[in-house]
Every structure is written in C-alpha cells, then in structure tokens.
Amino acid sequence: MKFFSIFLTLFFLLNINSNSQIVSDTWENCSKYLGNISRDLSSSNITTTPENWLTYWNQVTPSNAGKWGFIEGQRDVMRWDGLDKAYQLAKDNGLKFKQHTLIWGNQQPAWMDNLSAEEQLEEIEEWISEFCKRYPDTDQIDVVNEARANKPDGGKKQDGSYRANYIDALGGLGDTGVDWVIKAFELARKHCPNAELILNDYGILNSQGNRNEHIAIANILKNKDLIDAIGVQGHSFTIEKMTPNQMKFSLDQLGATDLPIYISELDIDAEGTNAENTQLTRYQNLFPIMWEHPDVAGITLWGYVKDHMWRETAYLVHGENIGANERPAMEWIKAYVNKSNSGCDNTGPILSFEVENLKFGIYPNPVKRGSKINIVSTQDVKSIYIVSKDGRVVFAKKLGDSVSDIKIDLQEGLYIIEAHKKDGMKLYKKLIVK
C-alpha cells in the first residue's frame, strides 16, 4: 500500500530507535486486509469518521452512504457527501476502498417503481456510470448484494414494505435464472473496468443450500469473466453457533471456485450474563479460521463503536476517541493479528498501537496549504518536526504546555509529524497537505 511503503522508508530515514512509539504500524506487502465501514449506520446523515478509525482498520466500506436509495432518494438529486468522505478516507491513507453496493432489492430509490422497464434500465446504467466516473480508483465493488434472498423483484418483505421492482429491466430470470445478475455485472465491468467485482450474500457460511446457490451464481459469472471475488456476510446471527470445523468446511467449498473470498459485514454479538466473555470466545473460535484460510483475502467488520452498530451488542470499542476503552475481543484481535498470519513480508504485531498513553493529536488533517494545524494535548510533547517523504525536516518547533496553533505553508503531499515527548519517547502522525 502506498502510504505504508512511504512510512517504511521514513522508518529508516528518521532513525527510529527502540524507544519509539509507532502509531500507524505497517501493513506493507500484506496479502489480506482487516477493514470496517467508515461510519455506521442507522444514522445515515452522519458522515464523519471516528477519530480512532485508522488505529484499527486498513480497508474502507461506506455502508449506507454507498447505497443507491440513500444517494438518489430524489430522482436526479445526488447526495455524494458520505460516499465522498469514505472514498477520501481510503485514498488519503493508501487503503483499499470497496463500494457497497450497486444493485440490491432493498434501500433502492422508491421513484424507480413507477418507471417503465426501459426507463429503469437507463436509470440503473446512469447510476452505475455516475458512480464509476466519480470514484475512478475504486478497488472493489459489491455489484449485487443478496441475489439469492433479496432480488429487486418487487416482493413483499416481512415488515410489510416491498423490495425494488426493476429485475425485469435487467433481463429478469432469463435462461440462466440469474440473467439480471449477469446484466448488473456487465454494466459494472463496462463502467468500472479496473475494479474487483464481487457477488455478496448472507446466510452462506452456515447453510449448505444457500452456499450451493451462491457458488452456482458465482460460477456462471466466472464463466463469463464477470466476477473477480466471492463475498460472504458474517453477521453474528448466521455464524455464532458454527464450529471451527464447520467454518473451515464452508470456506473450503467457496475456495473451490478459485475466486478470492471476502468475509463482509462481520459482527459478533455479546450476549448473556457474561456477554463480553461470550463475544471473546466466539471471536477466538471463528476468527482465526477465517483469517488464516488461504482463500480469504480480507475481512470487513460491520461497525465497531458502541451505539453506532447495526447489531447493538456487537461493538468492540466504547467510544470514537483515540484511547477509548476496548472490549476483550478487540484487545484479543489486536494481539492475534500479526504480519505473519496476515501474509506480510515481516513478522510481528500489526494492531499493537499502545494508544492509551498517546496525548498528541493534530487537526484538521488533511489540511489546506497555508492553513493552521492545531496541536492538541501537548502537555507531554516538547517539540515537533515535520518531515517530508524524502526524509527532509521541513518544519521544527518547540511547544509549551498549552494547545498550539501552527501555521504551515508546505507543498501538497504526505508528511510525517515526529513529536518528541518529555520522557524521550517519540510519537508519529502522518499529515496530508492538499
């Protein structure tokens, strides 16, 4: 990943010693990612990213902000703000960005219902085309979500509402039974030719019948060179009772497609009188099987902050601030995930940030050229240095015991802020100047 390559170079240029504290440890040359949604979930109008997001994750999925019904709730009036921020979070930090989702029976524009099939197809292609033009460096796309159970066929849902009704505009079931899925992937391949295209669905890991159907659709798409990976949701209510052997068997079957597997929408509930221990045990039983499986190329959790989760009890961290209390399952994940079991070139932990002693921050970040940056909680920091990506110190300043505002006039690009603490420890933050 671009940023971490730069940081690894700076690691040597800055002569970091054994007493240094690395805030963003390196995922350099790793074969899989551990991602999350940029902001969850029920509050779709909130588009800020938690302050501690980059402390844990290295792949971005937008959640509700990427769904067509949210973006174009009113015809030809596009709300891109949430998706813009998710995309920028990824691109500013050298992380993979996955769009969720293009076609789904749920959370689609209600105004589509009364259009003719011809008009619907025009609108579908316009939606996909506009997305691909706006976000040309999208790495991955959940092209169709829940093709098995939530087709856009106008069917009635359990809550009494109805799914989107544009399946015929995409070709209906047709000769294959999934012609509409094929058409959706053709449009995605046409307009986003460089993105990795994924078929995503739920209830796949825990059900042989569902898995067979999911694999069959994937193989149809594979034979037409329209699919690049297979996605399987990992919501707690579908996997929490699985044994490690059952999980491995399911992943082996999915891997037989010769497509990379992405575990999407992972959350594991904490329930009962000893809820946190239940959650921890579930992670310890199932997460290593998924993470270390040779065909699994990444896992994306579906939220992590308390009160900002679709599965309310599944949170891992109590707040959004750096240093917020972590549940035992989060502490275990940090200790478990390392460069070796992540397929990286180096050995050692990845999620070992030791943020509880971190009393140093900068905002805004990214910052516009010529603007001020604010150094917060500087009582432990005596001086800072701003270092360019070629190793040159471009700014140096001693700090007092109060918050400092520093006006900078740097060229656009990526920099490392090196903060020297009074106890001799060094802290590192990256700074992006636009």
Image: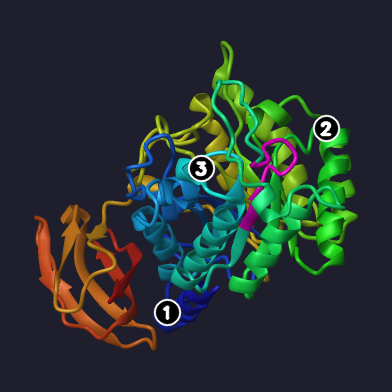
Which residue range is magenta in the image? 142-152
Badge 3 is on which residue? 114
| Front-lying residue, 288 or 65 | 65
Badge 2 is on which residue? 207
Residue at disc 1, secondary structure: loop
- How many marks are shown on the rendered structure? 3
Q: Residues within 10 Å of mark 2 (few under 14, many from 20)?
A: few
Q: Where on the picture, by quarter, is residue 407?
A: bottom left
Q: Along the horizontal axis of the image, is 59 left or right of 224?
A: left
Residue 355 x/y as whole percent: 39, 49
Label 1 with label 3: CB-CB less than 8 Å: no
Residue 246 falls within the magenta-colored stretch = no
Q: Residue at x 50, y 60 (%)?
A: 127
Badge 1 is on which residue? 15
Q: Distance between the Cα atoms at labels 3 and 2?
A: 36 Å
| Front-lying residue, 159 or 297 | 159
Q: Where on the picture, by quarter, is residue 395?
A: bottom left
